[in-house]
Image: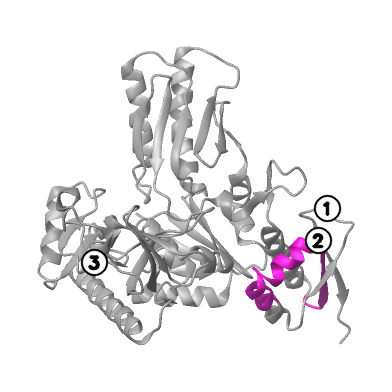
């Protein structure tokens, strides 16, 4: 029986989405911003691009799809189909693309730091139960569906409905779905694919052709629709938009899409605000009294396991087992990627170490990014790799500290969007108030540039311009809201 709840918090310029279990414990989290989407590339988005440069030495090409930086197309993703030969074929990137060519690509990983987004020419169209792969024939079933009879049933259903050049991936959410449901979804995905092709034929590069859906449905497309009991949204327009999209996909959860009735913060009201607020904290407490320390660097993420001062082999094992479960949860919540190294407490025996590795593998099994556990090193470090998809949470919210230069602090845009949310909350509480936002120059500049659409949205909600006032007495990252009564 589905028990998860998807909580959607909508504010000007930013949508935050939390997936929680029946006990209000976070299972997944993401932040969608209009500014970061425009600059980093929409994960899963299909773009019409133009090949700017072919780099034979890298066996890659750089494509202009209208973002801040050209995106990266490697040879493995340039091949029309994954089974069209590997190194033995001795193919080159120039066999597949040439400079000036107009091509259709899909974003596999958003841009980060100094690297552009990673894209593929193999386009897929994702639904709640299936992923349609035009031009890539074959039927594949999610490894999460363990029952062989069910796997064969799903293969049989799909095989009879696919065209000669179509392929399909059956997601874990397809388990138990009827033949009619799957056939209906495949037909819808064909329609969506046809719409993409039509837009490509009538558009000039660079152009975004898809990915215009709500953040909530994009979030579910990445993480999976199964196990979801209901969706709670704090914005009326977003509530309706999500309901329309999920109805079209035949993926409405049993409890439907519900408008949160209160005018306060939906995360606070539903008990997930504190956990969301702690997602950037380095230290994560364990129930046993120990902790894990998470430290991100450009090259690697290090997770250190501590037992709170106590010692002993039994304690070390139990703490390690608890720690790797919590580490797996935070890897997904914070969207950590690349090489992740967990410094375990010292334990003796290969069997004991193997038990810890297996517990970590089980904890990561349902992570949609597909992390791989590499095992333990001679020094007792447990290594994990996780593909980069969406930007890590820290990259969205934080930047170099303007005071010390060596640490991290909320970016001016993060501060500005938080301030707009506070302004909105004050107006909800007292509709007659006329607010003034007092803050620093970098925050004002960020709202007028990167956050311009959020500022426009805020002013539309207010019904008048928002007064942004420079206050040089405030420290970096601070803001103050002043309000006057509207006598009219």
Q: Residues within 10 Å of mark 3 (few under 14, many from 20)?
A: many
**Disc 3: which residue:** 133
Instruction: Please state, as top left, top right, bottom left or bottom right, where the C terminus lies in the image.
Output: bottom right
Q: Secondary structure at mark 1?
A: loop
Q: Is residue 438 magenta?
A: yes
| Front position in the image: 172 or 236 | 172
**Disc 2: which residue:** 440
Whether pointer 2 and pointer 1 mark residues with C-beta atoms closer than 8 Å, the reply is: yes
Please state the horizontal and vertical placement of residue 396, each as a whole percent of the image: 58, 55
Q: Earlier in the sequence, mark 2 or mark 1?
A: 2
Instruction: Please state, as top left, top right, bottom left or bottom right, where the N terminus lies in the image.
Output: bottom left
Q: Residues within 10 Å of mark 1 (few under 14, many from 20)?
A: few
Q: Earlier in the sequence, mark 3 or mark 2?
A: 3
Residue 134's image quarter?
A: bottom left
Please state the horizontal and vertical placement of residue 216, each as a whole percent of the image: 47, 66
In the image, is 128 to the left or to the right of 281? Answer: left
Please state the horizontal and vertical placement of residue 293, each as a whole percent of the image: 57, 32
> How many angstroms separate mark 3 from mark 2 (CA)?
49 Å
Q: Is residue 253 visible?
A: no
In this picture, is 392 found above or below 167?
A: above
Residue 266's image quarter?
A: bottom right
The residues colored magenta run: 431-458
Q: Is residue 89 visible?
A: yes
Residue under the point 88% across and 74% down: 484
Q: Which mark is residue 475?
A: 1
In this picture, is 418 found above or below 183?
A: above
In this picture, is 36 found above or below 379?
A: below
């Amino acid at each position: 029986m589905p028990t998860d709840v998807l909580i959607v918090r909508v504010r000007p310029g930013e949508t935050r989405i939390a997936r929680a279990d029946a006990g209000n414990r976070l299972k997944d989290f993401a932040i969608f911003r209009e500014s970061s989407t425009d600059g980093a590339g929409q994960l899963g988005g299909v773009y019409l691009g133009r090949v700017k440069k072919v780099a034979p030495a890298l066996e890659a090409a750089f494509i202009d799809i209208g973002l801040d930086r050209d995106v990266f197309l490697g040879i493995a993703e340039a091949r029309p189909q994954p089974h069209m030969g590997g190194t033995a074929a001795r193919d080159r990137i120039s066999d597949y693309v040439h400079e000036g060519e107009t091509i259709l690509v899909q974003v596999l990983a958003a841009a980060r730091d100094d690297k552009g987004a990673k894209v593929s020419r193999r386009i897929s169209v994702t639904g709640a139960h299936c992923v349609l792969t035009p031009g890539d024939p074959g039927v594949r079933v999610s490894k999460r569906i363990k029952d062989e009879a069910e796997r064969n049933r799903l293969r049989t259903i799909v095989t009879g409905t696919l065209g000669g050049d179509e392929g399909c991936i059956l997601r874990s959410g397809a388990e138990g779905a009827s033949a009619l449901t799957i056939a209906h979804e495949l037909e819808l995905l064909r329609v969506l694919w046809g719409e993409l092709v039509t837009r490509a034929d009538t558009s000039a590069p660079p152009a975004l052709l898809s990915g215009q859906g709500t953040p909530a449905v994009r979030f579910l497309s990445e993480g999976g629709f199964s196990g979801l009991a209901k969706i709670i949204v704090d914005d009326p327009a977003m509530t309706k938009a999500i309901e329309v999209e999920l109805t079209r996909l035949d993926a409405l959860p049993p409890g439907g899409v519900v408008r949160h009735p209160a005018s306060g913060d939906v995360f606070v009201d539903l008990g997930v605000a504190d956990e969301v607020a702690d997602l950037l904290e380095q230290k994560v407490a364990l129930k046993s009294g120990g902790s894990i320390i998470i430290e991100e660097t450009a090259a690697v993420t290090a997770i250190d396991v501590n037992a709170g001062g106590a010692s002993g082999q039994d304690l070390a094992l139990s703490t390690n087992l608890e720690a790797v479960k919590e580490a797996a949860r935070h890897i997904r919540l914070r969207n950590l990627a690349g090489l992740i190294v967990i410094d375990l407490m010292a334990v003796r025996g290969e069997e004991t170490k193997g038990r810890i590795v297996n517990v970590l593998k089980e904890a990561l099994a349902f992570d949609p990014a597909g992390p791989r556990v590499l095992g333990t090193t001679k020094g007792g470090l447990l290594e994990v790799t996780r593909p980069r998809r969406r930007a890590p949470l820290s990259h969205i919210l934080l930047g170099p500290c303007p005071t010390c230069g060596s640490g991290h602090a909320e970016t001016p845009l993060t501060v500005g969007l938080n301030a707009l949310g506070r302004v909105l909350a004050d107006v909800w509480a007292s509709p007659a108030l006329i607010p003034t936002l007092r803050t620093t120059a970098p925050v004002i500049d960020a709202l007028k540039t990167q956050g311009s659409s959020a500022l426009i949205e805020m002013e539309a909600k207010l019904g008048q311009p928002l007064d942004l006032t420079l206050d040089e007495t405030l420290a970096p990252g601070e803001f103050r809201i002043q309000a006057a009564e509207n006598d009219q």
